[in-house]
Amino acid sequence: MKPLYTAEVTAQGGRDGNIKSQEGNLNLQLSKPESMGGDGSAGTNPEQLFAAAYGPCFLGAMKEMAKHLKVELSDPKIIVKVSLHDNDGKFHLSAALNVVDEAVEEDVLTDLVKKTHQVCPYSKATRGNMEVVLTANKIEVEA
């Protein structure tokens, strides 16, 4: 299967380092959050980056699914929370995605989010590997 697109990013220095894309339009300083022993300096972290990538991917898949199901979306947004957990030195991630579109009926949006979760590339990549909690207008969606 031929890739549609391949991103290349170089990371140096770990959680207190930096990341830069091959073409240079992504160039970010990383810093460890204070809750993890960081000094509070400016910079992002891997969990924020994962959330920043998962959200737009999910919304893009949802817009395609909405077209397929003939669902009229207003101006949907997604709030993504990614948490890093420490279980006696065995680290793992979890995510919570809340899709918000007040103009779409609750049952329609819930169904749309559920179906999107089946086709979104990030959802597929995380399935069985990490807990993902879905909500639509703050109503939990059974995945």
Image (cartoon, rainbow, N blue to C red):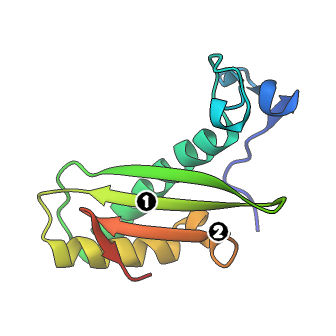
Compared with 143, 53 (above or below) is above
Q: Which residue lies furthest to the bottom in this view?
A: 142
Q: Is residue 47 left or right of residue 89?
A: left
Q: Mark 1 points at which residue?
A: 97
Residue type indicated by callout 1: Leu
Give the percent coordinates (x, y) of residue 53: 56, 46
Q: Mark 2 points at which residue?
A: 126
Compared with 123, 83 (above or below) is above
Residue at the (69%, 41%) spot, across then down: 46
Q: Which of 133 and 27 is in front in this view?
A: 133
Q: How crowded is mark 2: few (under 14 residues within 10 Å), some or many (20 or more)?
A: some
Residue at the (54%, 60%) spot, across then down: 95
Residue at the (59%, 65%) spot, across then down: 121
Residue 97 visible to the viewer: yes
Give the percent coordinates (x, y) of residue 11: 84, 32
Query: How far apart, in angstroms, are the residues tagged by discs 1 and 2?
Result: 13 Å
